[in-house]
Amino acid sequence: MVSDHRGLVAITGANGTIGYNSVLHALRTGYRVRCIVRREDAIGYIKAGPSLQLYADRIEYAIVPDNTIPGAYDEAVQGAKYVIHIAGVWPKPHYRPDEDVYYPFVRSMEEILSAAEKSDTVKRVVFTQAGAALVSTDDGDTLGTKMDKVLDVNPDAAAFQPPLPSVHHAYSGAKAYCMTYLHSHSRKSGAFSIVQVIPGTVIGPSELVSSASDALAQMDRMSKALLFNGATPRYGFGFVHVEDCARVHVEALDEEKVQGEDIPDWFIAAATMEEGKDGPRIWKEAGDTVEREFAEEMRNGVFIVGRENLPTNMPFRVDSRMTEEMLLGGRKFRSLEECVREVGQWYSGLVQNEKN
């Protein structure tokens, strides 16, 4: 077993998709972990993870019911050497744009920074961001699928301020504001360094899911579209296996691997797309893989390949070579085809187990 010589890392949103896998990767690579969650029942959810059983003596838990109030994270972060802030709000249609989406993102960021500054122990904070900050919600379905745009924070989205007309404006506006603010703040903070990570669409199996119905309910939109001919996703900003995404978050803590002066504006956590390859071609190749790898499941009606359901907007050709070199030891991110293949194997395995 790896010795816990790397210090304590506090991880918010530890019961979420990226969060749980980040907890696992941190434990496997020698960190102690403090899982920060919003509810008591989330602790039991994490503890049920089969892979965590080996590391039970190196895990702590903290509950922060409201991460927007002053001092929200002060106790939860105290004594930690590192923080990974993943917790966020998914913009559900019935949410209030300002109160339930925009302000929680902004204030939780502010509270993490405040807690880190008060701690006297935190050396680095990693923030999870989102591709939503790269587009303006007002663009609608106009971005196309050429994958020829350059990644950058969209100035329109960064200018979105409450009162906001929709949860989508609130989500993209809050993320753009946070990314811009942290970029400015990182040049002023001397006590700790700041790293930002932009994941692509996160794809992959979950060991916390034990039934096919729960797997389908929690599955990402890309996999549903490809494996089940599900609804057409609206956006695609690159694709990342959940374990690769978690690895980026944890490896970004390494102050020797990523020294302060070498920290980029952000790390892109998604597979690099070959120049000249557009969305339809990438989607076709993934569909070919589904048909080839799951021929029996298709004959049995388990899967129905969704060849025509590529995302409406796939504007960015992701270039994550710097992330691969600095954080993954030169290893490449798993491709969309590889990610969907693993999801298919996971789901079909659950179906088979339920038949036996």
Image (cartoon, grey):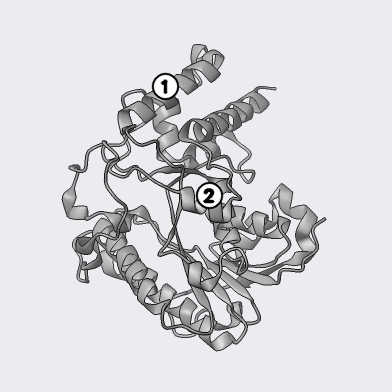
Q: Which SS class for mark 1?
A: loop
Viewer-proximal residue among 195 and 43: 195
261 with respect to 210 (left or right): left
Which mark is first along the chain, 2 or 1? 1
Q: Is residue 342 above or below residue 73?
A: above
Residue 316 lies, in percent from the top left, at: 31, 45
Amino acid identity at mark 2 = Glu
Q: Residue furthest right?
A: 1
Q: Name the residue: 21% across, 67% down.
A: 160
Q: Residue furthest top?
A: 299
Q: Which residue is mark 2?
A: 324
Q: Can residue 309 be seen from the camera position used here?
A: no
Q: In the rendered view of the protein, which quadrant contains the C terminus? A: top right
Q: How many marks?
A: 2
Q: Which SS class for mark 2?
A: helix
Residue 170 lies, in percent from the top left, at: 27, 63
Q: Name the residue: 50% across, 80% down.
A: 72
Q: Can residue 123 be seen from the camera position used here?
A: yes
Viewer-proximal residue among 271 and 45: 271
43 with respect to 170 (left or right): right
Q: Name the residue: 64% across, 69% down.
A: 9
Q: In the rendered view of the protein, which quadrant contains the N terminus? A: bottom right
Mark closer to the observer (1, 2): 2
Residue count near mark 2 (Cα–Cα under 10 Å), binned few <14, some 14–19, many ≥20: many
Which mark is drawn over residue 305?
1
Amino acid identity at mark 1 = Val
